[in-house]
C-alpha cells in the first residue's frame, strides 16, 4: 500500500504546486493536468486491492500530500502566500468527495468490461470535483465572510457570466481529456488481472 499512497501524495503535491501556474489566459492551471492522475491511482488500487484499500489510499495519500504541501510552502517561499482558507477548503472537500465517489462508482461496476469502471467513475468524480471546487471557492451565492471580523459577504459577478464558470468548464474539459488518456496506462497496468 505504500507505493499507491506515495503516488497519491505526489499527485496532491504536484497539483498544489501546478495550480499556481496559469495557462490559457488564466482559464487553466497546470494543476488541471496533474490532478486527474489521482483518479488513475484510485482506480488502479481499487482494481488490484478493492474498495477498502482504495479509500485508504485516498485518505492517507491526501493527508501525506497535504502535509508535504504545507511544509513545502513554508520552505519554498517563492510561490507566494498560502492559499486563502476558502480555496483550501474547496480543494480539500472537492478532492475527498470526488475520490470517494470514484471508489463507490468503480466498485459497483467493476465487473463490466475493463474500461467502463475507470471511465465512468473518473467522469463522475471529475464532474463532482469541478462542481464542488469552483462553487465553494468562487460562487458568490455561497456566502463566506471575506475577512475575520468583517461580516461583508462575497458578491456574485453580474456580467454575462462569472469568470469562474469559464474556468470551471476549461478545467472540466481537461479532466475529461486526461480521463480518456488514462485508460491506456490503466489497461497496461491491469492487463494480467482477472
Image (cartoon, rainbow, N blue to C red):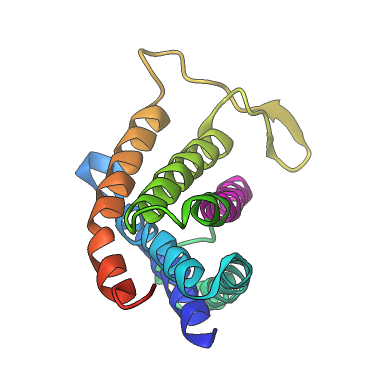
Residue furthest to the bottom in view is 2
Prevalent SS, magenta region: helix
Image vertical order of residue 89 relative to residue 135, above or below: below
Residue closer to the observer: 23 or 127: 127
171 on left or right of 74: left
Image vertical order of residue 169 relative to residue 32, above or below: above
Quadrant placement of the C terminus: bottom left
Q: Is residue 100 magenta?
A: yes
Residue 130 position by quadrant: top left
Q: Is residue 32 magenta?
A: no
Q: Give me the residue at 22% from left, 40% from top.
A: 25
Q: Residue 75, can we see it?
A: no
142 on left or right of 3: right
Image vertical order of residue 189 relative to residue 122, above or below: below
Q: In the image, which residues are magenta?
A: 84-102
Quadrant placement of the N terminus: bottom right
Residue closer to the observer: 122 or 155: 122
Residue 92 position by quadrant: bottom right
Q: Give me the residue at 53% from left, 86% from top.
A: 2
- Residue 13 image point, x, y percent: 45, 70
Q: How many marks?
A: 0
Q: Residue 150, can we see it?
A: yes
Q: Give me the residue at 74% from left, 43% from top.
A: 148
- Residue 80 image point, x, y percent: 45, 62
104 on left or right of 29: right
- Residue 187 image point, x, y percent: 27, 67
- Residue 34 image point, x, y percent: 34, 62
Q: Give me the residue at 58% from left, 76% from top.
A: 64
170 on left or right of 164: left
Amino acid at each position: 500500500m505504500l507505493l499507491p499512497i506515495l503516488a497519491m501524495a505526489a499527485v496532491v503535491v504536484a497539483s498544489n504546486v501546478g495550480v499556481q501556474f496559469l495557462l490559457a489566459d488564466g482559464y487553466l492551471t497546470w494543476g488541471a493536468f496533474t490532478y486527474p492522475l489521482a483518479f488513475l491511482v484510485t482506480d488502479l488500487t481499487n482494481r488490484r486491492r478493492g474498495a477498502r484499500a482504495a479509500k485508504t489510499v485516498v485518505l492517507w495519500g491526501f493527508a501525506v500530500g497535504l502535509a508535504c504541501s504545507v511544509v513545502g510552502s513554508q520552505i519554498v517561499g517563492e510561490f507566494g502566500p498560502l492559499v486563502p482558507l476558502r480555496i483550501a477548503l474547496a480543494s480539500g472537500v472537492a478532492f475527498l468527495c470526488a475520490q470517494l465517489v470514484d471508489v463507490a462508482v468503480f466498485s459497483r461496476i467493476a465487473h463490466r468490461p475493463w474500461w467502463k469502471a475507470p471511465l465512468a467513475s473518473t467522469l463522475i468524480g471529475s464532474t463532482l470535483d469541478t462542481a464542488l471546487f469552483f462553487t465553494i471557492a468562487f460562487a458568490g451565492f455561497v456566502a463566506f465572510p471575506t475577512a475575520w471580523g468583517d461580516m461583508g459577504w462575497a458578491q456574485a459577478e453580474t456580467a454575462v457570466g462569472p469568470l469562474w464558470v469559464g474556468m470551471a468548464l476549461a478545467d472540466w474539459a481537461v479532466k475529461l481529456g486526461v480521463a480518456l488518456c488514462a485508460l491506456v496506462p490503466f489497461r497496461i497496468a491491469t492487463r494480467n488481472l482477472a
